[in-house]
Image (cartoon, grey):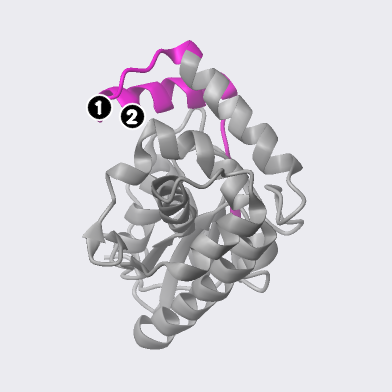
Amino acid sequence: MAGALRGVVALDGPSGTGKTTVARKLAAKLSAGYLDTGAMYRVVTLAVLRAGVDPADAERVAEVARSIELNIGTSPERPSVALGDEDVAAEIRGPEVTLAVSPVSAVPAVRELLVAEQRRIIAEVVDAQGGIVVEGRDIGTVVTPDSPLKVFLTASSDVRAKRRSAQDSAAGRESTVDDAKASVERRDKLDSTRTASPLRKAEDAVPVDTSELNIDQVIVALAELASQRGLLSECPVEVTR
């Protein structure tokens, strides 16, 4: 058994680096909570699209964000995402939301609203469970800048495109590697150049290139980092290679 996490692990990086799978499995391994902040922006985006609002209309997008009830679970084994009482976990991963999420996420009022909610959830989970793994694009730089362990996952655009295409195919969505590569590169540019909380590596984040690593290898590396930072309980971390 791995030791239980004490504190916050901030996990950032662009799409296709394995962030979600790594964050969930690491949280489960370390008996910690889990928060997918990207899913929160996707729920707002879904609500914006359903309302017929232009994602580029910042004022109306902010109005929609303030009007909805967003519910997100923090169990790594059973993460849930709901708009009100409606389970939207599958719908927020669709191509329409994926295409519109960057402009919606770039609205400063939306980021302010969701960052406040993310901090509330993180504090609540840490108080109740002791630790949480939080994934996103601005966790180490904005949401929890005081996190004792910040990790920035990377991978080549070709590798990320192959992973994204495989994910889409597994979910029943048609996607070629070329389409996926264009999509991840577009998202990278939008996320890294936005004015509000751009995607970037925190100065004290540990970079981990996942291009040549499988999920289990990444989990082992991050668990070891957490142990080295003194973030685990006295139980030794189980390391299997």
Disc ID at residue 170: 1
Position of residue 205 measured from the top left corner of the image (x, y, whole percent): 67, 56
- Residue 42: say if magenta: no
Q: Is residue 95 visible?
A: yes
* CB atoms of marks 2 and 1 within 8 Å: yes
Q: Quadrant of residue 126?
A: bottom left
Q: Which residue appears at 30% of the width and 43% of the height? A: 91
From this view, report whether residue 74 is shown above or below residue 100: below
From this view, report whether residue 119 is shown above or below residue 58: below
Horizontal side of 55 relative to 96 (left or right) equals right
Q: Is residue 16 visible?
A: no
* Disc 2 residue type (three-letter): Gln
Q: Badge 2: few (under 14), some or many (20 or more) residues near its Cα, within 10 Å?
A: some
Q: Which residue appears at 59% of the width and 65% of the height? A: 149
Q: Which residues are magenta?
A: 151-178
Position of residue 45 measured from the top left corner of the image (x, y, whole percent): 47, 49
Tell me the quadrant of the picture where the C terminus can be found. Answer: top left
- Residue 175: say if magenta: yes
Most foreground residue, 131 or 144: 144
Most foreground residue, 237 or 192: 192
Tell me the quadrant of the picture where the N terminus can be found. Answer: bottom left
Q: Secondary structure at mark 2?
A: helix
Position of residue 56 measured from the top left corner of the image (x, y, whole percent): 63, 43
Most foreground residue, 106 or 72: 106
Residue farthest to the bottom, as pictured = 127
Disc ID at residue 167: 2
Alpha carbon distance from label 2 to label 1: 5 Å
